Image (cartoon, rainbow, N blue to C red):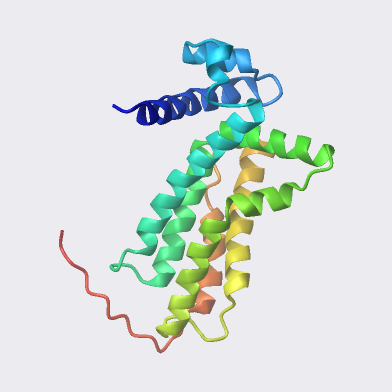
Amino acid sequence: MSSQVAHEKRKQEILEKALDVFVEEGYADTTFQKIAERCGITRTILYLYFDNKKQIFNESIKRFLSSLEAEIALIARDQHLTNGEKITKISEILVEACERESKMLSVVMDYLLRLKASGGNPDEKVRRRTVRMRHILADIVIEGIKCGEFKESSSVKGTVEMFFALVEAAVFRLVVLGRKEAAGLQEALTPFVDNMLNPNFERNIENKED
């Protein structure tokens, strides 16, 4: 194994364990020392991979989102699904991810509030982190309009914004209200998607056996 590959492998291992520390301790109480101890290394070695706690946190969130983006991209490419079904399925995956990672989301919320308090722009930060997912959703809507599945009057931007409003509502329920689940939120998207559908569209996607 080359030194570069070994370096990247160790870096990913640090990110995995660091995220657990952030979830358990919260952003404010997580320190470089605690992360180093969790990884079984010294602070000096940790500095070989990351400059500070903020960089580790950002990289950890990026890693989580990249995994989620890959899952969403697979659905977007699934030719057995209509575009409306893709949007519905992606919404289910995102809400389930919010439920599964509610502790991590509480840390993200804490970080964003601190960012705002220091004069930063949390909305811009979130949009930049979710730009790939927004593009995937926009492409699905555009394809749906092109193939005649969605009405020509369907709004690409409006659909994407509605979709992420659903995710934001899930985060609010789970983190702020402290609920254990966000069940039922997907139902809010159903009439929205149904209204986009062209009643004259005939589905011509053939189901294929694996």
Answer with left or right where residue 78 lies relative to residue 147: left
Front-lying residue, 107 or 194? 107
Q: Quadrant of the C terminus?
A: bottom left
Q: Residue 68: x and y, percent?
A: 45, 47
In this view, the residue farthest toward the left is 209
* Residue at horizontal 18 percent and vertical 67 percent from the top: 208
- Judge whether 83 appears above or below 185 on screen: below
Front-lying residue, 192 or 48? 48
Q: Is residue 180 at least partly visible in the picture?
A: no
Front-lying residue, 100 or 137? 137
Q: Is residue 143 at least partly visible in the picture?
A: yes
Q: Residue 124: x and y, percent?
A: 71, 52
Q: Residue 192: x and y, percent?
A: 56, 71
Answer with left or right where residue 72 lies relative to residue 190: left
- Count of numbered labels shown in the rendering: 0
Answer with left or right where residue 10 lies relative to residue 168: left
